[in-house]
Amino acid sequence: MQDQDIMENKDFFSSIWKIKALPSVLIMIWRAAHNRLPTRSNLCKRDINVLGNFLCSLCGYVEESVDHLFVTCYVSIRIWKFCYNWLGIQSVMANSLESLYLQLGFSVYGKEGSKA
């Protein structure tokens, strides 16, 4: 995840709390944006035993990070493609969590953040 880029984007953080969603969803988005989700990579950094394996629990090929889990894992990509098709959104897949958030925000709510 591009921690420095996201951490410096105050508009990104303030916009999270404006989303109409359950508080638990907003907290998860906030934690993901701050790289505070218990991914295997983060658990290993904190010396928490994850059975000696820091690879993605979905694909098993790449280190499990927030960006990988939500954006670049081939399993996640398939899920996002299904969701995009269901919503009728045609878009290029995002390459980071922040770009995914911005992409979905612009696709669903328009550039001004209000329902299109």
Image (cartoon, helix red, strand yellow):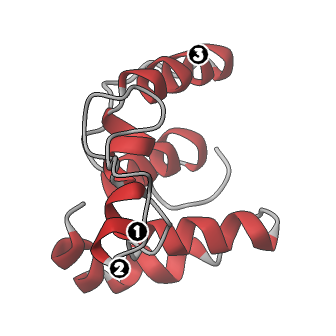
Say what secondary structure mark 1 lies in: helix
Label 2, on which residue? 46
Q: Farthest residue toward the right?
A: 22
What amino acid type is highlighted by mark number 1?
Answer: Leu
- What residue is shown at x 65% (from left), y 74% (from top)? 27
Horizontal side, residue 21 vs residue 45: left or right: right
What amino acid type is highlighted by mark number 3?
Answer: Phe
User: How packed is label 3: few (under 14 Cα within 10 Å), some, or many (20 or more)?
Assistant: few
Q: Position of residue 47 (x, y in %)?
A: 34, 76
> Between 2 and 17, which is closer to the camera in this rendering?
2
Reading the chain from its start, which is encountered first: label 3 or label 2? 2
Q: Position of residue 5 (x, y in %)?
A: 18, 73
Horizontal side, residue 69 vs residue 53: left or right: right
Labels 1, 3: front one: 1
> Between 60 and 69, which is closer to the camera in this rendering?
60
Label 1, on which residue? 43
Is 109 located above or below residue 114 in the figure?
above
Horizontal side, residue 41 vs residue 43: left or right: left
Labels 3, 2: front one: 2
Whether residue 19 is visible to the viewer of this picture, yes or no, is no
Label 3, on which residue? 82
